[in-house]
Image (cartoon, helix red, strand yellow):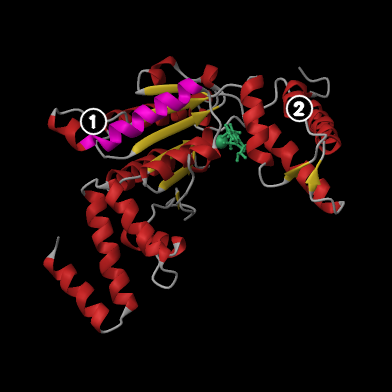
Amino acid sequence: MNSDLIKQLFRSFVGKDNDSFLKAANEIIENEERKKHRILVKELKEILNKNGNLGIPSEGYQKRLKENLPIPRDAEKGFSLLEIKEFHLDWSDVILADDIVSALNRIIKEYDKSEILATYGIKPKQKLLFCGPPGTGKTLTAQLMSSLLGYPMAYIRFDSIISSYLGETATNLRKIFDFFEQGRWVVFFDEFDVIGKHRDDHYEHGEIKRVVNNYLQMLDNFTGDSLIISATNHQHLLDPALWRRFDEILYFDIPDEKRRVLIFEKYLTVITKGNSLDIKKLSKQTDGMTPSDIALICFESIKNSVLSDRNRVEMDDLTSAIIEQKRRKDIKGRTNGVK
Ligand SMILES: Nc1ncnc2c1ncn2[C@@H]1O[C@H](COP(=O)(O)OP(=O)(O)OP(=O)(O)O)[C@@H](O)[C@H]1O
Ligand SMILES: [Mg+2]
């Protein structure tokens, strides 16, 4: 460890200087982060967080990250091209199919052993594509990966970088890739289909094609340590050339009956369950629904029971919330006669 930092720690302890202590502690954490000592980093952060006054407030930590690395901005409009966020999720927050859980566990393991893998000249899987219908947990899972790896998330909405000044888009992409080459992030390109779905769009064909090619090249040439996750719910629109670029492609499906039981249980743990509650039955009634639908159904039911001063959720609360959710989905599916 850097001897200056140790001295700074001692001096700040003797001088009761919390700011100076935190500064040194943060630098130590960042040094360890660079060395990929993730478990140590996680433990150090936890130790700091345990002590209320000395803790690294999440916002403060983000602010520090931002101070060190200026967030790239769109040159024309000045908005930031990405957002840095920190998450603290664990496996219990996301209910996923077994094959996805094992693929993700495997990736985490690869990052855990990345130093050893590096001695063989091998890198962990770095480029993931999450596909599947809306509300199946793609964004949530990217947040989970950020939490488990201990890398902050760099969140990029694709449509925001496809600037109305299309000529700027390639520059924006370059700025983004340059930014995350420097650190260790879970880079999340959300609604990535924007880039894929316009590829054959006759209006902006040339420009969009150039952007797609730029993106692919940058993905190919990426040498940083970050994990790059792209998400889409229009995988069928993506150009076949894109598929080769990903180390792992995961499909987030609509949960089956068994998984729906787990999702109901997860979202209803916060409240006392009335005797009438039959989760198996609820699961049967929600065939075809996404985890997001089920989460909403549970939130509505909990609200309902709290508002009627019961603080106990009953089957009726859930049944009516299911009917309401079905009605909403039905409206969404209507096309006003437009085909
Ligand atoms: N697999 C899951 N397990 C538990 N909760 C889930 C899961 N999937 C979705 N949810 C709930 O639904 C919300 C929305 O999910 P999320 O944003 O991850 O969906 P998405 O797949 O990214 O959808 P979109 O394609 O619209 O971006 C989550 O915040 C969570 O409350
Ligand atoms: Mg999403």
Vertical side of 217 occupied by 308: above or below: below
Tally the numbered discs: 2
Q: Secondary structure at mark 1?
A: loop
Vertical side of 316 occupied by 47: above or below: below
Please state the extent of the stretch shown in magenta in the rendering: 98-114
Quadrant assignment for the N terminus: bottom left
For marks 2 and 1, the one nearer the N-term is: 1
Residue 110 belongs to the span the image colors magenta? yes
Q: Residue furthest bottom?
A: 15
Which sits in the foreground, 220 or 231? 231
- Please name the predominant secondary structure of the magenta segment in the image: helix
Give the residue type that dot 2 points to. Answer: Leu
Residue 219 belongs to the span the image colors magenta? no
Quadrant assignment for the C terminus: top right
Q: Residues within 10 Å of mark 2 (few under 14, many from 20)?
A: some
What residue would you read off at disc 1? 123
What residue would you read off at disc 2? 282
Residue at position x 40%, y 40% in the image: 187
